[in-house]
Image (cartoon, rainbow, N blue to C red):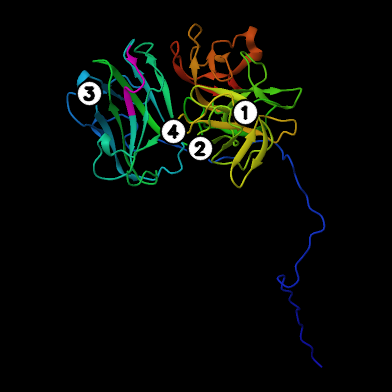
Amino acid sequence: MEQSLRIKKTKYTKHPVEIQQQLHVLNPFYGIKPQYQRAEVPPGGDCNTVGDFTEQTSGQLDVVASADPRVGANSIKLTQTVAAGGTAVYMLMSGPLDLSWARYVGMWFKGGNADQFDIGDIYFYIFTKEGNYLYANRARAIDFFEVQKICAGTAVWNYKELDLDRFVKASGYEGDLLKEVWGIGWQSVAGDNGNTLNIDQIEFYTHATGYGPARGNIISIPLVDDVHAVPGYGIAWDHTAGRAAVSADNEPDFAGICVGNPSITRLSADSGAAATSITVVDASLFEPGKATIWDDSSTEALTILTVNKVTKTLTFTALGNAYTVAAFAKIAMEGNEKGTIRIDVLIDGVVNMLCDASNQPAAADAVSCASAGATLDIDDGGGADNSGFVIGKATESPGALEHTPILLGVTDGVRT
């Protein structure tokens, strides 16, 4: 008698499978961290064609082509006048761009020799609605010079990095999201007659170094005890702890530049001095332990006692200062002995760094850190007597106090 083969099927909804043993990795291998890195120059953002830019009112805030570029063939030159209050120069895109992926916008800039720009002189703004591109109809804006800037000289280019999260949204404006960006511009509010501002290579990007986008290999490193780091800080290896610390001047164990601290979050409500709790935007990566809180004018360390991840409330002993949302107050965890607080560090790639005032490298010179930590700058310290301090190679010959590209991790053509 012929028999047919029958397969018994099991529905796991009725017969669940129980796994008896599980593997839990508390601290996975700290190695190369593939990350979505993006930096794009929008159409017209190369500043090669002055016709891409429009004056709101001719003879007030003017724009002309400049044969003094930082990148490419030309830059544009904006000229302030006494009568320029409230007038703008803007650039329209060839079509609406989805820039919702971006976290920063940056550009090269320089002023005339000894030109002074004060807080509130010039605003940079973004349009997210088609039609009227004057400043009054912008969706987002930020003070271009949040501290007084006296330009060091006509040959000195610096990089201006603007955090898109810090832009002030226009009250009642329709559609302030970055999914549909139609243009950007500058508004002159005040300033000295004849002040000039050259602009070149406008770009939007995801990872910041303080002076422009990060491009290269990024690793995830745990912080040493009681140390916090934010994008732009120099980072060094602490051999004793086997973790990372903020680097010192000419640190032989320089590791790279911090481009991210996942624990950083902003306050979602103002907090007065002596407060014992704060509410934050994201508490998911916080835990009891030490942290640093800061804004534009104050900073202090505190010890987090409890974390409520539902209400996003952190409790601690009393604050010494008041912190507000308007002042862009932030908080970040400090490192601990468990190694659970990590930062993202760019270990190689081209980054912009500030050149020391007294010891400039030539193109292809090895460079070292003249100062590190929160004020990262480089000098020509790559000679034989300082070979242990080399962090990379200059790709150009900068002037004093000029931002210049440095190829991290490469000296004399050999990757360190």
| Dots 3, 4 in contact, CB < 8 A | no
Mark 2 residue element: loop
Q: Nearer the viewer, residue 45 or 182?
A: 182
Horizontal side of 83 relative to 146 (left or right) equals left
* Identity, as a three-letter code, of the amino acid under mark 3: Ala
Which image quarter holds the C terminus? top right
Q: Which residue is mark 3?
A: 84
* Identity, as a three-letter code, of the amino acid under mark 4: Arg
Residue 226 drawn in magenta: no
Real-space Cα separation, disc 3 to disc 2, in angstroms: 36 Å
Q: State which tag comes first along the sequence, 3 or 4.
A: 3
Q: Which residue is mark 2?
A: 269
- Residue segment shown in magenta: 115-123
Foreground mark, 1 or 2?
A: 1
Real-space Cα separation, disc 4 to disc 2, in angstroms: 15 Å
- Label disc, if present, on residue 166 of the rendered structure: 4
Q: Quadrant of residue 67?
A: top left
* Identity, as a three-letter code, of the amino acid under mark 2: Ala
